[in-house]
């Protein structure tokens, strides 16, 4: 079991790095908007470019990646990711950074697909849940450690620093892949007929229950990612935080979700996923309404509201993920979740893009219309409740 643990820690490290790579750009918004002299619309495009490319590559990657030895293709994909991250670090202008983010998204999306495929191939079903839990804990780790530390270093030096550090970590993790991940070729010799992407799309779109589940995913992403990319720029420009003080928001929010996430999971099993989802969705609109209307505000109050936002956002996601997963039978679950994940990424991209088009900038540098974005996000969030009630769990 020692080799299995090393493999899982390697996958967790890879997951941590590429999640930080995606997340770090959003809190760097105030620096990037100031240094490149870009508008909220251009910053929204910068955020969405990663998710658009990640969504498309993760969907199609789930089909062509099966033709190769998992270890070899992961090495090549991660080399591409490392080079893209270095490209972000070296970017001298907005347009170059935008191109580097597109490439990072392509390779990041393929990395996500490969991590899930390797766990499915190597870890028996009896231990797969715990294995997935370890690897996916990288998201909380990225929130609690990666993003605040990257933001702290960026505030001490400049925005390039986190990307240089991520590049170094990527190179180190390449060494872990070489050493701890074995050649994985069992999927190449198994006589498995794999559905092509068009068949998967046709299968999902012809299933009204799965379409409701995907609609729920899209609505949830709009309810969150119209808010999140501009949380940092708004908190600096309108609420009065310094760029260094932003680290408190991400550190507090991430730390609390580490403890509340398992608790919400237990509540979902005990009282019903739909009931817990509905409660947390209603609770989630409270911090959205407050955050998007704040003026200059004392730090403790902002931290209380932002932490409630992170906790309730995570709280509605846990039962929703279980509901959505349950709409697919085991034989089609992998392809359905791949398709759903891709749609989620693309929805995040559109949410960021649309928010960037709505939000403006005053002559004094403050962001305008963030409250309008908040109201739209609340509408999307509340629409999730009747949709979730119509989703039926079939397995």
Image (tube, rainbow, N blue to C red):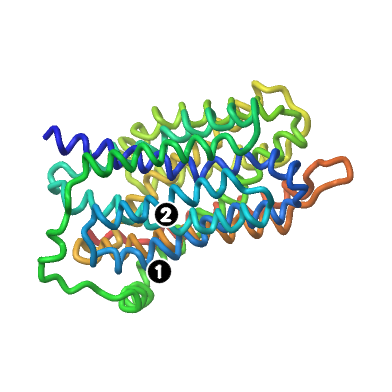
Q: Secondary structure at mark 1?
A: helix
**In the image: residue 51, left or right of residue 327:** right
* Residue pictured at 58% horizontal, 61% vertical: 350
- In this figure, which residue is indicated by the disc labeled 1? 211
- Quarter containing the N terminus: top left
Q: Secondary structure at mark 2?
A: helix
Closer to us: 66 or 367: 66
Residue 176 position by quadrant:
top left
Count the labels in the image.
Answer: 2
- Quarter containing the C terminus: bottom left
Label 1 crowding class (10 Å Cα cut-off): few <14, some 14-19, many 20+? some
- In this figure, which residue is indicated by the disc labeled 2? 80
**In the image: residue 381, left or right of residue 336:** right
Report x, y in % for residue 372. Answer: 72, 51
* Residue pictured at 38% horizontal, 44% vertical: 318
Seen in the picture, residue 291 relative to 102 is either above or below; the reply is: above
Seen in the picture, residue 208 relative to 310 is either above or below; the reply is: below
Q: Earlier in the sequence, mark 1 or mark 2?
A: 2
Closer to us: 108 or 85: 85
Label 2 crowding class (10 Å Cα cut-off): few <14, some 14-19, many 20+? some
**Marks 1 and 2, Cα distance to the nearest angstrom?**
34 Å
Seen in the picture, residue 257 relative to 77 is either above or below; the reply is: above
In this rendering, which labeled residue sits more in front, label 1 or label 2? 2
Report x, y in % for residue 114. Answer: 30, 54
Report x, y in % for residue 120. Answer: 20, 52
Report x, y in % for residue 199. Answer: 31, 78
């Amino acid at each position: 079991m020692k080799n299995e643990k090393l493999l899982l820690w390697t996958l967790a490290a890879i997951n941590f790095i590429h999640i930080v790579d995606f997340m770090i750009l959003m809190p760097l918004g105030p620096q990037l908007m100031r240094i490149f002299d870009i508008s909220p619309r251009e910053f929204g495009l910068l955020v969405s470019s990663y998710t658009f490319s990640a969504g498309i590559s993760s969907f199609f990657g789930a089909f062509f990646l099966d033709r190769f030895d998992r270890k070899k293709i992961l090495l090549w994909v991660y080399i591409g990711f490392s080079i893209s991250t270095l490209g972000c670090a070296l970017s001298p202008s907005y347009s170059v950074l935008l191109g580097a983010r597109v490439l990072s998204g392509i390779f990041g999306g393929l990395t996500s697909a490969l991590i899930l495929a390797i766990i499915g191939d190597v870890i028996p079903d009896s231990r797969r849940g715990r294995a997935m839990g370890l690897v996916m804990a990288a998201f909380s780790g990225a929130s609690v450690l990666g993003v605040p530390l990257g933001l702290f270093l960026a505030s001490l030096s400049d925005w390039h620093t986190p990307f240089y550090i991520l590049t170094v970590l990527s190179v180190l993790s390449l060494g872990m892949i070489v050493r701890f991940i074995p050649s994985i070729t069992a999927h190449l010799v198994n006589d498995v007929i794999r559905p092509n992407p068009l068949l998967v799309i046709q299968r999902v779109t012809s299933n009204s229950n799965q379409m409701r589940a995907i609609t729920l995913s899209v609505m949830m992403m709009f309810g969150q990612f119209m808010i999140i990319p501009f949380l940092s720029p708004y908190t600096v420009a309108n609420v009065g935080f310094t760029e260094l003080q932003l680290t408190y928001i991400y550190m507090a929010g991430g730390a609390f979700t580490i403890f509340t996430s398992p608790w919400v999971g237990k509540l979902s099993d005990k009282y019903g996923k739909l009931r817990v989802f509905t409660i947390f969705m209603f609770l989630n609109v409270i911090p959205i309404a407050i955050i998007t209307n704040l003026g200059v505000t004392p730090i403790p109050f902002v931290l209380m509201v932002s932490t409630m936002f992170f906790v309730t956002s995570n709280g509605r996601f846990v039962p929703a993920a279980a509901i959505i997963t349950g709409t697919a039978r085991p034989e089609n679950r992998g392809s359905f979740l791949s398709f759903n994940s891709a749609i989620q990424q693309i929805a995040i991209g559109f949410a960021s893009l649309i928010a960037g088009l709505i939000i403006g900038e005053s002559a004094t540098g403050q962001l305008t219309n963030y409250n309008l974005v908040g109201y739209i996000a609340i509408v999307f969030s509340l629409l999730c409740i009747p949709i979730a009630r119509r989703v039926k769990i079939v397995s």
